[in-house]
Amino acid sequence: MHSLTLRRPDDWHLHLRDGAMLKGVLPETTRHFARAIIMPNLVPPVVTGAQALAYRDRILAALPDGAPFEPLMTLYLTEGTDPADVVAAAQSGLIKAVKLYPAGATTNSHGGVRDLTRVYPVLEAMAKIGLPLCTHGEVTTPDVDIFDREAVFIDTVLDPLRRAIPGLRVVMEHITTSEGVAYAASGGADLAATITTHHLIINRNHILVGGIRPHYYCLPVAKRESHRLALRKAATSGAACYFLGTDSAPHIDALKEHACGCAGCFTATNTMPLLAHVFEDENALGQLESFTSLNGPAFYRLPANEARITIVKHAAAQTFPEKILTEAGPVTVFNPGFPVYWHVES
Ligand code: DOR
Ligand code: ZN
């Protein structure tokens, strides 16, 4: 198959930032994607409905002319979050999810949650109205090895939480382990998981062998090869509980190529060609639309997009910009390390 027409995809986990960075990276997403769940980890974070409304306006103002793109807003959960504000923001249609960052887990998460029981009233209100909780699923306990933090989170935080608040709808964001794959499949219609493009392509060797590669460092950090293979099997299975969330997370090169480099892979530019490559490798091009365009809207109870994109496989390797030059500084585009023949034509 050399040409593939799909419903226009959505990105169910995206970092757009703000200001000059937002302006610079937004066209990379709107070129191919119709909608995206927008992460709220700005400085300061998007905590209230009023802040989400203002952030949405800034995103809409930064859109390239005529781009048909809908930002789906989220709130950053804190121990001070007011359940009534969350419910009002959801019922007005403004927000589509609330994001749980365990305090200290990743970029700008210091305002996140330390004691989960303190946000139970918010979570109970969310369960009542069916508003999904998106989880950054890593424990932050210093004595838990960074490669084990996702599996320990599932056992010690997520599973107890789902038992304590039945009916809470949860998206396990950017899963990186076979444990994550298995748990997401075990929860029925109220549990799902997003998978990033880069975690389908790299394992931890790519970050560390032959020199340290800061542009492959993200959180949760890529795990060993057996986990990458489990993620590829899940993503290409067509199962309704897995869908694309790129976690495309721009940082300027000066902060990635740094003694204490920031976490994040920037994949907005080439995600769709890379996914076509991965799905073709797995003999699963027929499942690509489920992963990028159908399973996400079904979980979020939104209609699938009516517009279509066409992805074509060319005889020659296609080129992507090495960097996006934003007014905040250059951002390196994720390099998969192999030639890619697929190109989005429309
Ligand atoms: O790699 C990551 N980058 N993981 C996250 O959880 C946050 C993100 C960011 O905001 O840079
Ligand atoms: Zn993220």
Image: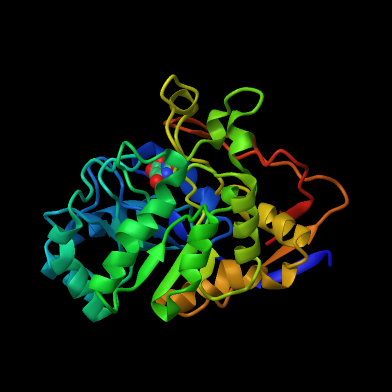
Please identify the quadrant where the C terminus is shown. bottom right
Percent position of residue 14, x then y: 44, 53
**From the viewer's perspective, is residue 177 above or below residue 111?**
below
Q: Residue at x 55, y 58 (%)?
A: 178
- Does 101 sit above or below residue 92? above
Relative depth, front residue between 311 and 148 = 148
Asked if residue 261 can be seen in this view, the reply is: yes
Residue 179 vertical placement versus 302 (above, below): above
Q: In the rendered view, does 167 fall on the left or right side of 346?
A: left
* Placement of the N terminus among the 4 image quadrants: bottom right
Determine the residue located farthest toward the right in the rendered image: 315
Position of 97 with respect to 110 (left or right) is: right
- Give the left or right position of residue 233, taking residue 277 as reference: left
Coloration of the structure image: rainbow
Task: Name the residue: 77% across, 58% down.
Answer: 281
Q: Residue at x 44, y 79 (%)?
A: 188
Work out whether residue 254 or residue 345 is closer to the camera in this orientation and state it: 254
Residue toward you, 37 or 121: 121
Q: Position of residue 33 (x, y in %)?
A: 54, 61
The quadrant in which residue 191 appears is bottom left
Residue 156, x across and y down, in percent:
32, 57
In the displayed structure, would residue 318 be above or below residue 295?
Answer: above
Residue 302 in sight in this render: no
